[in-house]
Image: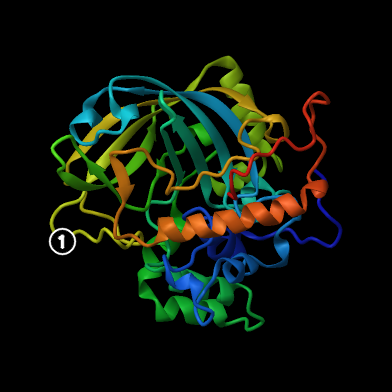
Amino acid sequence: MTRPAGSKRPTIVSLGIIAAVVGGAAGAFAYTAGWLSPDRISPDRVADGFGPGVVAGHRINHAKGTCFVGSFHSTGAGAALSTAPMLAKGDFPIVGRFNLGTPDPFAKDDTVRVRGIGMLISAPGGAQWRTAMINAPVFIVSTPQQFYELLQAGGSKDSEAMAKFTAAHPGTKPFLTWAMNGPWTGSYADEGYNGLNSFVFTDAAHTRRTVRWSMTPMQPVRRISATEFAKTGPDALEREIADRIARAPAKWMMTVQIAGEGDPTGDPSKAWPSDRRTVTLGEITADRVIAEADGPCRDLNFDPTVLPVGISTSDDPFPAARSAVYAKSFDRRTAGAANYPRHTNPDRPANTTAKEGGR
């Protein structure tokens, strides 16, 4: 890809605080209801917070990505926890997107710490389970308000603004430790992905359990250094995953961790104890990669509040807030659609968009 004139290559340092952080839980946030109030954060204000690096016609965050299609093979074990139809034993189609946590669709892969995966799992009858996960083990902040303040610090002319923010919010340390010291890989397929927000599973007896889900790679994982990965080229991840899946599908095991008494279900910056019960839901398979310009994820929103019966939001305020800003992102990129690169398939119409959303 050609970078727009005047754009600057982000650095690992700024990445650890801005690109990686902003990529964190998939987007931008506002209060679940308070964004309607003019004296509090709103979808427009949060979308603006991603700054001048947003490129017209692209998502305001996680702008660089590639589509895939595949399936979810449910073991049926999840049916004891939730009546969601795709947790019954069977196979269900997936439309997904591998992505980088940056508003810059032209970013070099080695400058972005956060990698993500978005998925839409469908079941007969029209039920959908949409989710967006990232490779970080925790999020950087506890509340939507803190995230908005983080965006402001990242865009401030005060060179000490970010240091002041992190000093005032010691809860950022676990994420920042991972961002600076966590392992790198050379492939989307080698990453584990975590849904940092909590949701509620409801079973046939109406028992409710708060859970977080995650994906663990089933293929052997190769760790590399940041320096080694930087030598692989600006679009290495898209090339590697396309080549890899052309040879054989990539697979992950999907599990849920069930919250215990007193666990912080509304705070994605805090991990739950490792001894909490986990249940294996099934196997995620990516069968085919399609360049985003022609792929089924191009106009798809991985809105975490689009859920089937049997799965609902919890006391975590982030999913509902993300939903509001995803819609704003969609409106903005639709308005700038003429700036999006030409489709590689000349038979595909320039705009086949149904209003699906933002990220």
Considering only vertical position in the picture, is 216 above or below 160? above
The residue at 36%/38% (across/down) is 308
Can residue 281 be seen from the camera position used here? yes
The residue at 28%/39% (across/down) is 310
- Where is residue 346? Give x, y as percent: 83, 26
The residue at 55%/59% (across/down) is 325
For residue 255, what is the image quadrant? top left
- Where is residue 56? Give x, y as percent: 76, 55
Q: Is residue 122 left or right of residue 27?
A: left
Mark 1: give few (<14), some (14-19) or many (20+) Cα within 10 Å. few
Q: Quadrant of the N terminus?
A: top right
Considering only vertical position in the picture, is 308 above or below 179? above
- Where is residue 146? Give x, y as percent: 44, 73
- Residue lying furthest front: 125
Can residue 187 be seen from the camera position used here? no
Q: Which residue is mark 1?
A: 262
Q: Which residue is more in the foreground, 171 or 126?
A: 126
